[in-house]
Amino acid sequence: MLLASIRWRNLAAWSLAVLGLGIASAANCWAETPKFEQILPILQKHCSDCHGSEEPEAELNLTTADGLLRGARSGYVVTPGKADASLLTQLLAKGSKPHMPPEGQLSADEIAAISSWIGGLPKDSLPDRPQLAKGKDHWAFKAPTKPKLPEVDEKMQAWSANPVDLFIAAKLKTAGLEPSPEVSRELLLRRACIDLIGLPPSPADVEEFLADRAPDAYEQQLDRLLASPAYGERWGRHWLDLARYADSGGFHEDIDRPFAWKYRDYVIRSLNEDKPYTQFVREQLAGDELPGSNADSLAATAFCRNGPTNDDNMGNNAMDREKYRLDLLDDVISTTSSVYLGLTVGCARCHDHKFDPLPQSDYYQLLAVFNNVTRKDVPLDDQGAPQFGQKSAEKGKPAVMAIVDASNKPRETFVLFRGDLNNKGPQVQAGVPRIFSPTAHFAPAKSERSTGQRLALADWIVAPENPIAWRVIANRLWHHHFGRGIVATPSNFGVTGSLPTHPELLDYLAIEMAATGGQWKTMHRQLMTSATYRQASQGNGRGNESDPQNLLLWRMNKRRLEAEAIRDNVLAIAGTLNAREGGPGVKPRIPAELLAASQRNKWPVVKNEGPEHWRRSVYIYVKRQMPFPLLELFDVPSTANTCDRRQDSTIPTQALVLMNDEFTQEQARWFARRVLSSVKEGSADDQARVALRFALSRDPSATRIAEAADFLQAQKSDYQNSGRQAAEATEAAVADLCHVLLNCNELLYVD
């Protein structure tokens, strides 16, 4: 019988049938702790047929002490110093289900001998699991060291604008490639605007930039964009993808979360303030445990509550409720580890991780960190201060969606073999993954109302010496600026993740970022002022042939706008974008035929949209059961799990909806009014020029203007022939042109 296939159960309370003693008492029958040589005959007699030295069942070799301590394929079978917590002794107990050996029964004396041997083992006697030992050589678990800047020839030295370029240049030189020319100033400004605020530059912005010949004109534009409130709205949306943010619970009931938006606003506000990443992480994992905790830091802890919930269907008995609670915590552990550490710790819930050096006990050490929390809508007093001592806020009363510790006494946490609540294994204490333990500083400081364990975890994550966390966040920023991370799997730095294309550059950026405590805006400036970022996106024969995926960055990557940016750009170009910040989510118009599919937490029927609906898409109510259709069409991610990279599909439905959707047609008419108000009595050429400048953020070519003017003349003539007056025909023709421009490829992509 394979040990790996056993359905383990909790046998910690079993007693020895013959002696009527517990394991610990039976072990005490031995005057001295036996040596392994004394228990080896027992194991040989009962276990060697299946667990001998040659191809042992479940890879558990019981012929040597080292083999026994190393454990089975699924994990350790011995807990040093704790016989009653050891799987081996639990399986040997009379009446255990499952039972070892499958047929037969060890005597009470034999079990007592094995128990005594286990009880005398030093706590540090377990060898590293093979995965753990192998994992120590994996690049992501080694501490980064600040690399020496690469030496390049004079030509590449002249091309480089900052240290980032030196790392890129060195790789290009080795590959026999050269960087692409710098992009035009108009396209560079649009690229920077889309990257930092998600909105196109206005014609006035373009004119001002082109006229400014100061050496630091571009840097001044970056500072202007980084100071804009729109920056937090743009980059906050990136973080909300990671945090699986939504305004409803999902599943069948899809219950409304009336205070979820406060987390979204917290993220946007934090980024606009350039809050250090160290503080950003501490607040989201332990905002209630921080000194001077307030409503803002409490709202941050909704990071741990953003996942889908099914509270109305969690079961009616204590066992079902506990399973549901552990499922919610599994979401927290999986999200926390992937977002901040780039590790898939959630895969170790039921067994040792199959690929990474993460034994099952690592998962439960992290569970112990969060095991004491309770979800609570903390009420606020008249001054907006949280009332920690009160119960969850009453419906309709001001509150913050948060997590807090149920008490300052940690809840006992046990390994659950195969993830089964009925199969308790050894007890574990809160801690970080063992692969980091030699240098990890994890020291919870208990307070009056909290265990301090989550704050200890957050402090370890953002410690400057953390070998992986700073690489992860630096790589995320690189990913959003260049379209692909230095590590192409931003939330998986493990063995199955992608290897870094420029490992020395990643270490350089991680160390630079850690040195500032994680100032995002400083890193934005460094990346965006590099010559690498300012390259054109057009390919060339040599580069396309030797590096078709552009892994070495010999050109800039052309990228499609995300779903929210597409909608926001349409509103901005039409001149209808409502810049109001924050507050509860808005609910724009959704086709009536789709509303019938959502029977709970219903979306209102909106016949006519107005300015209150034309806010930035980050403020649209996120309903899990019914994603906003236009955003879903352009690959807005599911909120069931964290999302580190959006899909970038190209399907016919996208073009059909942009052309035929009522929203686009309506915004085209507003766009036309904006054009006509700008040119007054201008000619078709003037109207075409202005419309193209609004849509493309640059001066159009004479050919494009002529084509657009001809289209206007033809459309106007058709409308007049059908009986419309000249002014009405002109407006309709301009609206048609604007409709075409809102569908053009150049608007949907950033060059």
Image (tube, grey):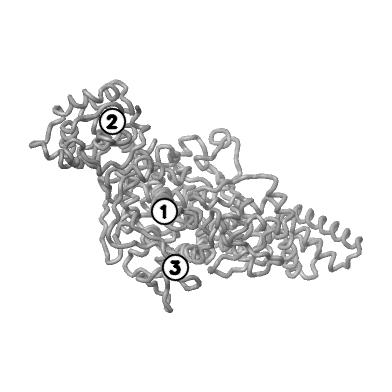
- Disc 3 on helix, strand or loop? strand
Query: Closer to the camera, 287 or 120?
Result: 120
Q: Is 397 or 588 nearer to us in this picture?
A: 397
Determine the residue located farthest toward the bottom in the rendered image: 382
Q: Is residue 504 visible?
A: yes
| SS at mark 2 in the image | loop
**Are the residues tagged 1 and 3 within 8 Å (C-beta)?**
no
From the viewer's perspective, is 676 left or right of 586? right
Q: Quadrant of the N terminus?
A: top left
What type is the residue that disc 2 sits on?
A: Met
Which residue in the structure is indicated by mark 2? 100
**Whole-percent x, y for residue 487 in the image:** 45, 43
Residue 400, which numbered label? 3
The residue that disc 1 covers is 317
- Disc 1 to disc 2: CB gap under 8 Å: no
Q: Is residue 271 left or right of residue 70?
A: right
Helix, strand or loop at label 1? It is loop
Give the Cα separation between the discs numbered 3 and 2.
Answer: 52 Å
**Number of disc labels:** 3
Give the amino acid at mark 3.
Answer: Val
